[in-house]
Image (tube, helix red, strand yellow):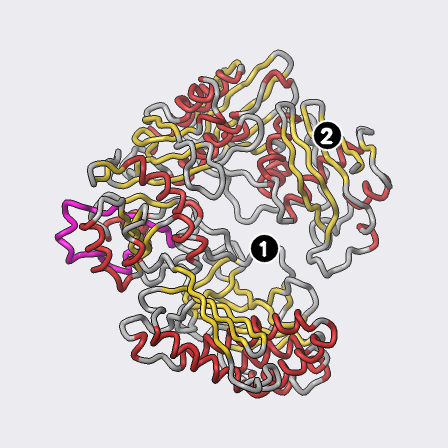
Amino acid sequence: MIDLINDCELVGVADPLGKKTGFLIPVFFSPASNALLVEERSSNGRVAGYSPLHPQETEILPTLRGQSRVGDRPHWAFGLGDGVLVGRGTQRREELKNALRGPFLMARPMLALEVTDFLGLKEDRNNLAAKIFADLRRKNAEVARRWRDIAILIPDIKAAWLNQQSDLTAGRKRGAIPTLAAQVREPEVAIRFSSSANFSGGTFRVHLERIVRNCLAELPDLYEEPNGDWIFRFQEARDTRDALDASPQARALIYLADDALPFSEPNRSGGYDSIGIYPQDKSREFIGDVLASETPSYVTFLLDDAYGAILDGAPELHHRRPLGLGVRAGRSKDLSRSEVQALSRYPHPTVVITQQSPPGFLRDTFSGELRDAVNLMSPSWYGDSQWIFPSRACAFMRARGLGPQKMLDALAQLYERCRQLKLDTTVGVAFLAMETAPSMRAYEFARVLFPQLDWKDLPKEPRVKQPIDAALLAAIDSNVDDEYRWQSHCKIIETILRKRGWETVVAVETNHEKRLNLHASAMDVELKILRDKPRGGRTSYNQPLDLNIENIDKLALVEDANAGMVLSRLERYGDLLVTPRDLCCFDPAADSVWSLHALQLKRMSHWMVSKSRTLHVALICRVAMERGMAEVDDAERLFTALKDPGLGQIAFLASSRLKTSELGCELKLRLVSRGSNIPLPDQFSKLGSFILRVDQNGPAMFSEE
């Protein structure tokens, strides 16, 4: 969520499918954010805050203006084809209920089923479910049975569990439910559930069976009562969140200090890595297992000082201090002052997990970079039952490189993130994967980017989901002088360029930028090292783009440069925005700025479509066609489509199958609409897929074989 935004104005509803049908997304505006926002809900169903709409290019339908505040009931919106109902809390629900009797929803029973669930109309929901089940069964009986079990029965069991909590769950916070699956093949009822200290044993099974029987009895049109009795078969799946049982075999013990930390599927987290997870109400069990074992232990908490101190009354942990793991609550790329201050919540050494979920997505606590940090740090920094770290507060990050120079690319990514977070890179430890660094050249560049760090080799088989080429643990020190950080940055960039083979001459040096003239055998360019990121709100540029990207001789260096920023800078100033990641692999022997375009294309490539990436790639494709380097089908129509003002609005270039080499890269491209069920307009349709290759000689296009 975005911090410091407590109220917003309703400006419309997002329609991802472009059909004005079904539940839509209310969208809000605040002067404190450049992005369109959506409401985030708390566990009590109220507005907890606001997050950016993702993607920002989603079609927005106008609606009556309204206000949203933290603590209010959230807004909802439903499209009826020719109109949209927008309400907040119970507002306009009666109109939505009346729409169930209208022709629009009567012709769309699946959509009507969603409405009955939303409105809590149990009888109407069951009648609709029976109708849908009968229709499905006429087409495919097995699909129909799977649908009724997953879409109807399991949600009913979970709802009944919450409504009938008994002494069996005493001591566990309200709202907790067992993880389960159900399959009914009359007369057998198979129930698979995740066992734990709270959800196991004979009493639990009796209680669960009674709930399931009641649910089946309430759905007579879906589940025909057998001649005899239902036959229940239970299967337990071990839940490693049950830390009391997991601790003897666990490779690490983790305590979740804040109830707000999301955590769900154990098989994708603790169970996968043999790690004991302790929820907030199991602090005493956690302390006992830490004291009774030699296993590395961690305390995970939010970097938000509003939640208060952690394990304050646990003096027994003074000599066996679990390592703190700080999870960032905000989404800004730099560490905020409040996040740094929140480190004081836990009085022992703490590692901040710097990577955040993309807008619109919510990850479980124990996943991604946090899981990799635990699996990497446990065997590396834990000895004699003590943590040995270079600083009391550190930041962890890891990277996977792209292209033939994987190690260098990964190190450059880490360097950029350190710059964005304003970390002290003079104190810390870095890991390199030896299998991607067979020569000393990677270490040479590593020591330039991080000249004062200690170095370790990554374990040969770290328990990580994706391969890691480099990882970093850097000190968090808010007292590092900004002038020192700036001068170090300039020195590192100059050294990298000289090691790549460039001749560098300082042309201009001010408090805001340093300008270098770079010379190679057949190429001269000017590089501005910018001290601050370019100012301005949203990136903007005219369409269709008419920019010269062939004869660029001026570059501007920043820590972050996406496609929109690159295009906007080109249009306004005529120079190419680059990052340290681009420069680290920019070979002067290429004698062409096109090798830099290839590096940026590789860096920006993504399976998700966006307006800015579409226009950036289209600009390169048009150069290939203007040069006569396009051997594609229907080239004239494709060229017209790439210049169409609707490109990036109603049609996009989707990329896949990225291939990289020392000379450049290539992508498979095709024109797509905003959604899979939205047809492409005629000017963009039936053009097929094609290959774009960019290297030092420029761009070229080929038909897919």
Q: Main secondary structure of the magenta part?
A: loop
Residue drawn where x is 32% and y is 24% of the image = 452
Q: Looking at numbered disc 1 in the image, what kind of residue is underneath it?
A: Pro
Cα separation between marks 1 and 2:
29 Å
Q: Is residue 609 magenta?
A: no
Three-letter amino acid code at disc 2? Pro
320 part of magenta stretch: yes
Indicate whether 632 appears above or below 19.
above
Residue 333 in the image, given as x and y percentages of width and height: 43, 45
Badge 1 crowding class, 10 Å Cα cut-off, few under 14, some 14 to 19, many 20 or more, is: some
Instruction: Answer whether residue 650 is visible to the viewer in this image.
Output: yes
Looking at the picture, how far across and down is residue 135, in whole percent? 71, 78
- Position of 97 compared to 495: left or right? right
Q: Which residues are magenta?
A: 303-330
**Which residue matches tag 2?**
699
On residue 204, which mark appears? none
Residue 645 image offset from top left, x and y in percent = 75, 49
Quadrant occupied by the C terminus: top right
SS at mark 2? strand
Secondary element under disc 1, as helix, strand or loop, is loop
| Residue nearest the observer in this picture, 152 or 209 | 209
Q: Neighbour class for label 2 at 10 Å: few (<14), some, many (≥20)? A: many
Relative placement, left or right, of 129 versus 681 is left
Whether residue 7 appears in this view of the structure is no
For marks 1 and 2 on the same chain, the one whose residue lies earlier in the sequence: 1
Seen at 69% across and 39% down, the residue is 617
Q: Are marks 1 and 2 in contact (CB under 8 Å)?
A: no
Q: Is residue 485 left or right of residue 524?
A: left
The one nearer the camera, 166 or 595, is 166
**Image quadrant occupied by the N terminus:** bottom left
Tell me the residue that label 1 is attached to: 55
